[in-house]
Image (spheres, rainbow, N blue to C red):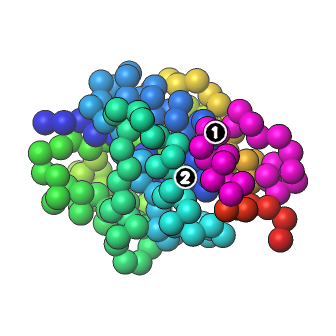
Amino acid sequence: MAKIGILGGTFNPPHIGHLIIAEDVLKKQNLDEVWFMPNSHPPHKTTETSAHDRLKMVQLAIYNHPSFKVCTVELELDGPSFTAKTMKTLRAKYSQHEFYFIIGADSVETLSSWYEIDELLKLVTFIAVKRSGFVINSPYNKHIIQVDTPIVDISSTELRKRIKNEENYTYLTVEAVRHYIKEHRLYGKK
């Protein structure tokens, strides 16, 4: 049975924090692969960048890593990207896999508000990684594996802000993603 970590998100854009977390969780939890899963319509966020652009940037960010894959299931489902709905689809399609859903410590605090959380807990084990200013403490702790990873205090929001303000972001994402952003004029001043 393959152990698959799922790293979901808008990836608007993907940055080195995503890659460091995926690599660290892959190694520390002896996962076989980490699947990066861009959201189509995240229920709690709006995105100004198309799902197509975000998917392309994820593909570029993980290109050539033998254990990183892209999972497009949320882009193919209709409606908001609810994790429970997605994991039911993945479990039906890949019944031979064991899934681990990777989240930040900040997301642990909101688990009780996730769509069908009790059903979701039967489908996946959560892996929570540390974030600055957050303590992992939840009524769902028995369903959560805590993993220490380097705390890289960067967000896609910060990255978009730097791009819009024409500030340096050279080391915050990989070269191929920077090239894509520049070529497609993403996140710049309107």
The amino acid type, in three-letter code, at marker 2 is: Met
The stretch drawn in magenta includes residue 173 = yes
User: Residue 91 placed where, x, y %?
Assistant: 19, 55
Q: Residue at x 66, y 70 (%)?
A: 48
> Is 180 located above or below residue 86 in the figure?
above
In-image side of 125 versus 98 (left or right): right
Q: Which residue carries the number 2 mark?
A: 57
User: Residue 142 placed where, x, y %?
Assistant: 33, 36
The stretch drawn in magenta includes residue 182 = yes
Quadrant position of residue 49 = bottom right
Quadrant position of residue 143 = top left
Q: Residue at x 24, y 61 (%)?
A: 88
Q: Which mark is residue 175?
A: 1
Instruction: Report the quarter where the N terminus lies.
Output: top left
Q: Residue at x 56, y 62 (%)?
A: 53
Q: Which residues are magenta?
A: 161-183
> Is 144 located above or below residue 70 in the figure?
above
Crowding near the residue tagged with mark 2, few <14, some 14–19, many ≥20 C-alpha atoms within 10 Å: many
User: Residue 95 placed where, x, y %?
Assistant: 13, 51
